[in-house]
Structure formats: structure tokens, C-alpha cells
Image (cartoon, rainbow, N blue to C red):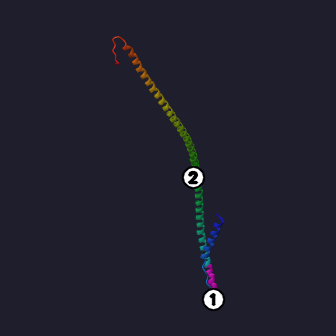
């Protein structure tokens, strides 16, 4: 117990002791007063001692109860302190894990951003290549059309040239008028 609590208990004991004493009144005659005072003093002192003993006994019971309550409260505080520390440690560990996860997510987002940029570059290159290929296919298509036109003209010229010598042969039909 601390000194303040002991002082408070002693103060309560003095107040209880003082409340248990009965005030004495002055008598009219000196002789009656002396006899009355002696009887009153011995009776009062017996009553006061018994009252004081009862009050001190009750005070000691109260002190014991208060001391036990203080010990229980102190034990509860220590238990709560241990629980708070354990929860704080667990919370700190969880916060650390969350921060680590956030760091991993940040790295994953950065990797994903790089991959998207590379994909955009590849798509752009594919688009440019497809435009180039489209231009080449257009050129090849034009060359094919020109070659086909030349082949058709050559075929027509060849057919006409082949038919022309056959007109001068004997017994042939003259197609051109």
C-alpha cells in the first residue's frame, strides 16, 4: 500500500473515533458534578473503547476488502496490458504483411505496365507491318492484273496469228470479209 492510502485510513479511523465520543455537559453542583463526571467518564470510556474496537475492526475489514480489490484490479490491468501487447504485436505483424503485399502488388502493376507497353509496341509494329504487307499485296495484285492482261493480249494475238495463216490455205473459209 502507498503512504497516501495509509494516511487516508488513519484519517477515517480518527473521524470514526471522534464521532463515537459523546459530549459532556457541565453539572450545577461541584460534588454532583464530580461524581457524575467520574461515572460518566468511566461509562463513556467503556462505550468509547468498545465502539472504537468495533470501528477499528470494521475499518480493518474494509481495508482488507479494498486491498484485495486493488490487487484484483492490478492483476486485471496486468492481464489487459499483456493482452494489449500481444494484440499490438499481432497488429504490427499484420501491418507488415499488408505492406509487403502492397509492395508486391506495386511491383506486379509495374511489370504489367511494362508488358502492356511492350504489347502496344508489338501491336503497333504488327499494324505497320500489315499496312506494308497490304501495300505489297496491292502492288503484287496490280502486277498480277497487268501480267494477266498481257497474257490475255498475248493469247489473243497468238490465236489471231495462228488463224491468219490458215486463211490462205486451200479450201479454207474466209472469215474476214
Q: Residue at x 57, y 52 (%)?
A: 87
Choose between 95 and 58: the one closer to the eye. 95
Q: Which mark is residue 29?
A: 1
Does label 2 or label 1 sit earlier along the sequence? 1
Q: Which mark is residue 87?
A: 2
Q: Report how far apart the C-alphas of labels 2 and 1 lie in the structure.
A: 80 Å
**Residue 51 location, quadrant:** bottom right
User: 175 above or below 37?
Assistant: above
Q: Please, what secondary structure does the residue beneath circle 2 have?
A: helix
Q: Please, what secondary structure does the residue beneath circle 1 have?
A: loop
Q: Is residue 154 left or right of residue 54?
A: left
Q: Residue at x 61, y 70 (%)?
A: 56
Q: Of all residues shown, which one is farthest toward the front?
A: 177
User: How far across and how far down the image is residue 101, in percent?
Assistant: 56, 45
Residue contact at pointers 2 and 1, CB within 8 angstroms: no
Marks 2, 1: nearer the viewer = 2
- Say whether residue 37 is magenta: yes
Q: Which mark is residue 110?
A: none
Q: Is residue 139 left or right of residue 7?
A: left
User: How far across and how far down the image is residue 149, in percent?
Assistant: 43, 25
Choose between 88 and 83: the one closer to the eye. 88
Residue extent of the magenta highlight: 28-42
Choose between 122 and 81: the one closer to the eye. 122
The majority secondary structure of the magenta stretch comes to: helix
Amino acid at each position: 500500500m502507498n503512504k497516501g492510502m495509509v494516511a487516508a485510513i488513519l484519517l477515517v479511523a480518527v473521524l470514526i473515533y471522534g464521532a463515537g465520543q459523546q459530549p459532556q455537559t457541565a453539572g450545577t453542583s461541584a460534588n454532583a458534578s464530580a461524581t457524575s463526571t467520574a461515572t460518566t467518564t468511566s461509562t463513556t470510556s467503556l462505550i468509547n473503547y468498545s465502539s472504537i474496537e468495533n470501528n477499528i475492526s470494521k475499518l480493518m475489514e474494509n481495508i482488507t476488502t479494498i486491498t484485495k480489490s486493488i490487487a484484483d484490479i492490478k492483476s486485471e490491468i496486468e492481464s489487459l496490458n499483456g493482452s494489449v501487447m500481444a494484440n499490438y504485436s499481432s497488429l504490427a505483424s499484420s501491418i507488415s504483411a499488408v505492406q509487403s503485399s502492397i509492395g508486391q502488388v506495386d511491383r506486379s502493376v509495374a511489370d504489367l505496365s511494362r508488358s502492356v507497353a511492350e504489347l502496344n509496341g508489338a501491336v503497333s509494329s504488327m499494324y505497320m507491318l500489315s499496312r506494308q504487307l497490304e501495300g505489297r499485296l496491292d502492288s503484287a495484285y496490280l502486277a498480277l492484273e497487268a501480267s494477266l492482261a498481257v497474257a490475255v493480249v498475248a493469247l489473243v494475238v497468238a490465236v489471231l496469228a495462228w488463224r491468219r495463216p490458215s486463211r490462205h490455205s486451200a479450201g479454207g473459209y474466209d472469215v474476214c470479209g
